Image: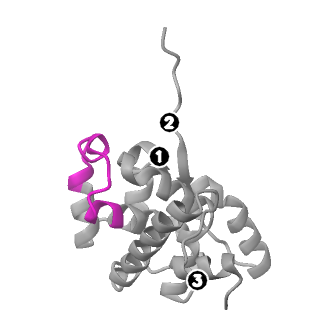
Amino acid sequence: MRRYVAPMIILQLDDFEYHVELSSSLNGEEANVLVFCPMFVFLVDWAFKNNLLSDSFVGSGNFILQYRKLVTGEYSFSNFVTETLEGKLFESHFKDEAKVFIKDYIEFDGFINDLTKVFSTNLGALPKSFENSEALYKAINLSRKNYEINQLNFSNLVVFSNPEELINQQKGVG
């Protein structure tokens, strides 16, 4: 008898409730967890454009129709995340060749670092359009390339930076 194994959630809006409560109390303004929707959208868009979304996810429901509406601006980032993704990104949404990178990229803050660096802002103020997203996707591609090279040289480390710098650090150079 096969035992049911729940799909692994790698990113969910509920994870940001604490940040919203903290922000609201510090700023005295009502904040909403939906400000974090661009994180989800940018990762899904990058994965889609790089053919890294699983066929079962892309083929399920109305994903393609909703994605097209998102890209053309007929569907907001928050609607896409809450309705299409139901506020969650699962490991199963991605192809096998991308799963480990994406899990590590999120868990070890590579994604957050790239987002805040490229857009020069905090996570709660990310753009809600695809304008300048290509710069982010270049940063994600570079992080993925660096991650894969670093995994070959230092399999016990999760690093998204330049592998030459890491090798020099390990050797005590520079």
Magenta segment, which residues? 46-65
Q: CA distance from mark 3 to mark 2?
A: 36 Å
Q: Position of residue 84 (x, y in %)?
A: 36, 51
Q: Is residue 10 above or below residue 40?
A: above
Amino acid beneath label 3? Glu
Task: Answer with left or right where residue 3 lies relative to residue 76.
Answer: right
Q: Secondary structure at mark 1?
A: strand
Say if residue 94 shows up in the picture: no
Return the residue at label 2: 7
Give the left or right position of residue 156, taking residue 78 as reference: right
| Disc 2 and disc 1 in contact, CB within 8 angstroms | yes
Quickly name the residue at label 1. Answer: 90
- Is 95 rendered above or below residue 161? above
- Of residues 119 and 71, the one nearer the viewer is 119
In the image, what residue occupies the spot 67% across and 87% down? 173
Q: Is residue 31 above or below residue 118?
A: above
